[in-house]
Image (spheres, rainbow, N blue to C red):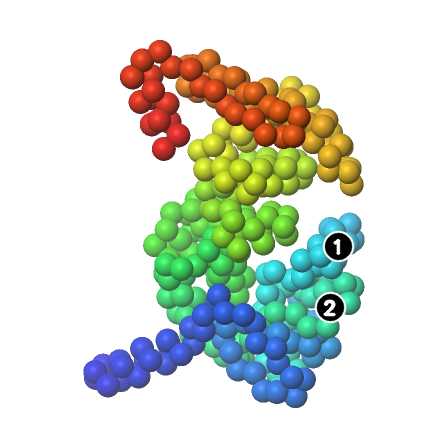
Amino acid sequence: MAKNTKDKLGSGLKALLANSNAKPKSQATKQSVSQVSGVAMIPIENIEANPFQPRTEFEEEKLLELVASLKTYGLIQPITVRKLSDTAFQIISGERRYRASKLANLKEIPAYIREADDNTVLEMALVENIQRADLNALEIAITYQRLVDECEINHEELADRVGKKRSTVSNYIRLLKLPAEIQKALKDGKLSMGHARAILSLENADQISLVSKQIIADSLSVRATEVLVKSMRHQDTPPSSPSSDTDRLEDNHEKRMVESFRKVIMDSLGSKVKINRNTDGSGKIVINFKNNKELEDIIDYFE
């Protein structure tokens, strides 16, 4: 291929790679939209369901949970639509999010917009885009899911395309199963992939919420988060039932969590550990060591 042809192809592909970190651009009802990897805000009345959608039933309880989340946080993960005309779009993926958005009375929602025959270009753009260093964990997860859904490839094929292990790809995609508030924390950089991977080992929604809040409030490292999660998973008594009263949840849960946390640290370090707490919530963790070697082992553990 001639050099000028390569240059044109390279510049053309770069033009498709709109910054996925950029704020969505609101589109007027009659404005023409032709983005491929960028995100546009589209009036929900301009979007129609895909008549060939293989999934026809959506679990009502899960749908209503999503509706409640959308009313609080909005739609975090954009849907993908096909452009039919300047003012008409058809869903390619994300019908459940679309239906929940309508029930939540959202006026417009974020969407990736594709032309009718751009499958190969889209895959090239997404694969190149995923190599960017400034993507957060949630953006990577969303891009991986798009490649799976829209390019119809499985996790193993995707791993080959992006040069990652299959387990790495699967772990990123699992992030999209986390509650919306944690996805938002990932998007905002308040939680890292390491934090999320530790949280994913918890199955109880209250534990997940409690741990994520503690990570942010105390600026916990990934290692400290793993210790905390391990302590919660080893509790003999199940967590208290969901309650709208956060203080009550913490009262029922906190003492067992702190004691389990203390025991896990003791077992991991082989050192005596004390957790002293004050009535105002402040306190300190005291880790005893007998010599310089024990101190070095403690430091190595938390690095």
Q: Which quarter of the image is occupied by the C terminus?
A: top left
Quarter where residue 68 is shown:
bottom right
Residue at (50, 73) in percent of width and height: 38
> Left or right: 136 with respect to 73?
left
> Left or right: 295 with respect to 203?
left
Under mark 2, the amino acid is Leu
At numbered mark 2, what does the secondary structure look like: helix, strand or loop? loop
Query: Which is more N-terminal, label 1 or label 2?
Result: 1
CB-based contact (under 8 Å), mark 2 and mark 1 = no
Mark carried by residue 68:
1
Residue 236 sits above or below residue 113 on the image? above
Residue 237 sits above or below residue 212 on the image? above
The residue that disc 2 covers is: 106
Under mark 1, the amino acid is Ala
Residue at (40, 60) in percent of width and height: 134
Q: Would you say residue 230 is visible in this rendering?
A: no
